[in-house]
Amino acid sequence: MTRYTKHFKRIIVSLLIVALLFMSGCSNSQQSQQSIPNGSANGSDTSQNQQQQSNNAENGTETTGTRIIEDSLGRQVEVPYDAERIAALYSFAGYAVTMLGKGDKIVATPNGLKRDAMVRILVPSIMDALVPRSSGIINAEELINANPDLIIVRMQTGLNEAETAKLDLLGIPYVVVDFNNIEEQQKAIAMVGDAINRQQEAADYNAYYQDAVERVSGVVEAIPHEERVRLYHSINDMTRTAASGTLAADWSIVAGANNVSVGQNLRESNGDYHASIEQILTWNPQVVFANEQRVVDYIKENSQWSPIEAVKNNQVYKMPHGLSRWGHPDALETPITILWAAKTLYPDKFQDLDIGQEIVSFFERFFDYSLTSEEVKDILSGEGMRDEKK
């Protein structure tokens, strides 16, 4: 996309709004005709493009142009060969782009990404990125102002016809990325790497990811299920927790936990899962992990939670926070979360695992950044690593 003047951008946005209003009256069949499930995002001939890619790859000279990738919806999307202006419109996408070495190319982002202290340290320019998405709604004018050449969105956006109609009209390639477990998250990282031309970096990260899984699995698989620690994971709020089939369930089980909420009847709301305090008391977890310090304080101090074994034995832990909140559904640091969780649950079985040194090596390897001892302490405690919502 060429750069617009502010006046011309307003004209374009007005035309887009008129077009969207017109489209709202079209039938679903008309909308489906506009999609290109088996072709490129902007209608170029896929086979011709793939042949060109093949020729360029053989010559070893490709530095510009486009490539075809497949996203989580199975769409064949024509993306820039090496995107220079990236709109990462949900947190995981922003973390992944940063880890893969193109954080400085992010021109649009959710506001939450700006609240992470380590993101600001690694990518100072993130504070200049525009925020064209709020409460799940894309602001087309702000997205045009960001002038991206690639957009990355989550599945919720990709399945919303009103939101994808806006994206289709902009004519900018967008990739839908989604995952629900460890295997799918590794695929999502590879997909983002493919979309931004950082395939080798993604492969290196996934190799570390798989190695972490195997390092822990090789130890905890010998623990009988009835002897595994009963864990309750509080995700942001006291009663929001891990359901079966989610990433939070997956990594905790790999870490050797008997996750008490997995397989239980939980209340679902907008994709989040909640337990009742009565259920939690019945489960009587031996350990509680929480993503927020206020939740840790509440659980420790509120009389409703006092009968729980984890509270009685002071086994309520605030999870670390590095680039992202460890163990959170949108977090990037799942492999190192598995290591930390296993060490916390079974310290006697992981005596040789130094989590502090693991964190230092992690940031050196994947972010080319040398942490100070104070930064390591901050990551482990999570203190001051994410600003409160304003």
Image: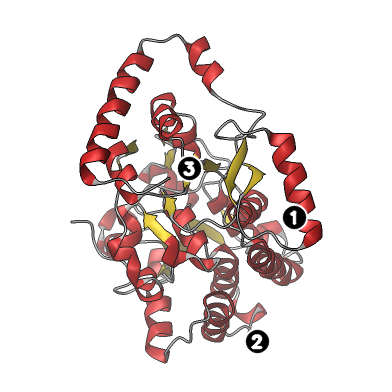
Q: Residue at x 65, y 35 (%)?
A: 74
Disc 1 residue crowd, few under 14, some 14–19, many 20+, Cα 10 Å: few
Position of residue 308 relative to residue 17, above or below, is: below
Position of residue 328 relative to residue 122, above or below, is: above
Q: Residue furthest bottom?
A: 373
* Drawn side of residue 96 relative to residue 199, left or right: left
Position of residue 169 relative to residue 255, above or below, is: above
* Drawn side of residue 51 relative to residue 266, left or right: right
In the rendered picture of this protein, how many numbered marks are placed on residues?
Answer: 3
Between residue 268 and residue 125, name the one nearer to us: 125
In what quadrant of the picture does the N terminus appear? top left
Give the SS element for disc 2. Answer: loop
* Drawn side of residue 369 relative to residue 18, left or right: right
Q: Quadrant of residue 192?
A: bottom right
Give the SS element for disc 1. Answer: helix
Q: Earlier in the sequence, mark 2 or mark 1?
A: 1
Between residue 119 and residue 329, name the one nearer to us: 119
Q: Residue at x 76, y 57 (%)?
A: 57
Which residue type carries mark 2? Answer: Asp
Disc 3 residue crowd, few under 14, some 14–19, many 20+, Cα 10 Å: many
Question: Residue 352 shows which numbered tag?
Answer: 2
To which residue does mark 3 refer? 154
Which residue type carries mark 3? Answer: Arg
- Location of residue 166 in the rendering, given as x and y in whole percent from the top left corner: 38, 30
To which residue does mark 1 refer? 56
Q: Residue furthest right?
A: 58
In what quadrant of the picture does the C terminus appear? bottom left
- Location of residue 162 in the rendering, given as x and y in whole percent from the top left corner: 39, 25
Disc 2 residue crowd, few under 14, some 14–19, many 20+, Cα 10 Å: few
Give the SS element for disc 3. Answer: strand
